[in-house]
């Protein structure tokens, strides 16, 4: 490999590493804490009982019920990620979870708002529930990490003094993955 091309690979490797280091630390810290069963907490919980003429079937119908209440009580805006499970409507975001549930005992509905502490917010970034910007950054981070690893391998295989050891480590990593997978 010519020195100009190798220098270009090294520069790209360095620039991507510098740009994505803060996000890398968020993913590492939140992932390690999650594996250690530190998931953060619900900082504040709010419940609002409401009366409905009929149960909303779609996300838009449910959002039209929940959104004015969020604004009225000065809560964060309705998060982007939606899920319809457990017989209710749920929205997840970095800062909060909002749920619209049917209370079968009283035949009324309840809006539940759970606001997260700092560690839960970091976990929500890690899980991809922090909005489109973090979602796109997460995808770009994955691509950057892949590029950084491949560029590191390409550079190390091009240096004669590192080639033998690099091949051995590449083989060891591959064998380890295959054995653990099987």
Image: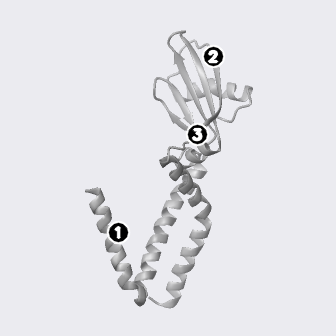
The image quadrant that residue 17 belongs to is bottom right
Q: Tag 1: Cα neighbours inside 10 Å, few (<14), some, or many (≥20)?
A: few
As helix, strand or loop, the secondary structure at mark 2 comes to strand
- Residue 158, placed above or below residue 112: below
Q: Nearer the viewer, residue 62 or 112?
A: 112
- Residue 40, placed above or below residue 102: below
As helix, strand or loop, the secondary structure at mark 1 comes to helix
* CA distance for labels 3 and 2: 23 Å
- Residue 58, placed above or below residue 161: above
Identify the residue under disc 3: 80
- Give me the disc on residue 173: 1
Question: Which badge, 3 or 2, is on the more N-terminal residue?
Answer: 2
* CA distance for labels 3 and 1: 39 Å
Which residue is found at the position 60% from the left and 73% from the top?
Answer: 15
Which residue is found at the position 54% from the left and 42% from the top?
Answer: 39
Question: Which badge, 3 or 1, is on the more N-terminal residue?
Answer: 3
- Give me the disc on residue 146: none
User: Which residue is the extreme one toward the front?
Assistant: 36
Which residue is found at the position 40% from the left and 90% from the top?
Answer: 160
Identify the residue under disc 2: 49
Foreground disc of the pair 3, 1: 1
As helix, strand or loop, the secondary structure at mark 3 comes to loop
Q: Tag 2: Cα neighbours inside 10 Å, few (<14), some, or many (≥20)?
A: some
- Residue 4, placed above or below residue 151: below
């Amino acid at each position: 490999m010519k020195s100009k091309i190798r220098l270009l690979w090294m520069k790209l490797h360095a620039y991507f590493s510098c740009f994505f280091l803060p996000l890398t630390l968020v993913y590492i810290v939140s992932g390690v804490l999650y594996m250690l069963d530190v998931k953060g907490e619900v900082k504040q919980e709010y419940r609002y009982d409401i009366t409905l003429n009929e149960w909303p079937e779609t996300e838009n119908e449910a959002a039209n019920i929940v959104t004015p209440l969020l604004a009225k009580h000065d809560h964060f805006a309705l998060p982007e990620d939606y899920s319809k499970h457990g017989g209710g409507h749920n929205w997840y975001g970095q800062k909060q979870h909002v749920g619209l549930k049917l209370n079968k005992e009283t035949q009324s509905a309840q809006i539940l708002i759970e606001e997260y502490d700092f560690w839960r917010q970091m976990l929500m970034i890690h899980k991809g529930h922090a909005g489109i910007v973090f979602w796109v950054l997460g995808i770009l981070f994955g691509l950057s990490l892949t590029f950084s690893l491949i560029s590191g391998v390409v550079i190390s295989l091009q240096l004669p003094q590192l080639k033998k050891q690099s091949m051995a480590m590449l083989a060891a990593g591959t064998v380890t993955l295959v054995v653990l997978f099987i």
